[in-house]
Image (cartoon, rainbow, N blue to C red):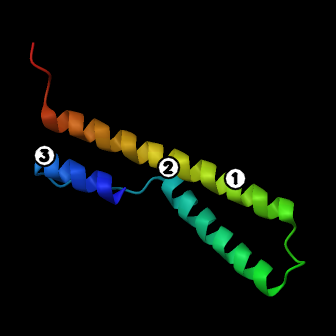
Amino acid sequence: LVVGYFLLFTMTQHAMEVRPSVAGKLSTFLQLSAVALVLVSLVYPDTVPPMAETGLFLVTGLVTAIAGFQYATRGLLWLQRQMGPPPA
């Protein structure tokens, strides 16, 4: 995300307004939940079922990929608007 923003700025010399998406916020929440789940399972090994851990990891990965795709799409659309219409 940061590298993409840097590349867009380098190419256009214009700063892009970055607004969080719902998927991005959900992704952050799920990532922090996964970290908390792992820490709890280290302290209390038998409290977290392995299927719950695996399920949370899979959902977290999927939502993170969706959020990344959204941000990449927003960046490309913004770049397209900055570059103007293609020559005829």
Please indicate, yes or no, whether residue 17 appears anywhere in the rendered image.
no
Q: Relative to residue 67, is residue 62 drawn left or right?
A: right
Q: Nearer the viewer, residue 24 or 42?
A: 42
Mark seen at residue 40: none
Image quarter in which the C terminus is found: top left
Determine crowd level at label 2: few under 14, some 14-19, many 20+ residues with C-alpha closer than 10 A.
many
Q: Amino acid at mark 2?
A: Ala
Could you say whether the residue bearing mark 3 is in a helix, strand or loop? helix
Choose the circle earlier in sequence order: 2 or 1: 1
Could you say whether the residue bearing mark 2 is in a helix, strand or loop? helix
Image quarter in which the N terminus is found: bottom left
Q: Amino acid at mark 3?
A: Thr
Choose the circle earlier in sequence order: 3 or 2: 3
> Residue shown at 87%/67% (left/top)?
49
Q: Quadrant of residue 82?
A: top left
What residue sits right under mark 3 in the picture? 12
Instruction: State the image coordinates of residue 63 (x, y, percent, origin top left).
Output: 59, 50
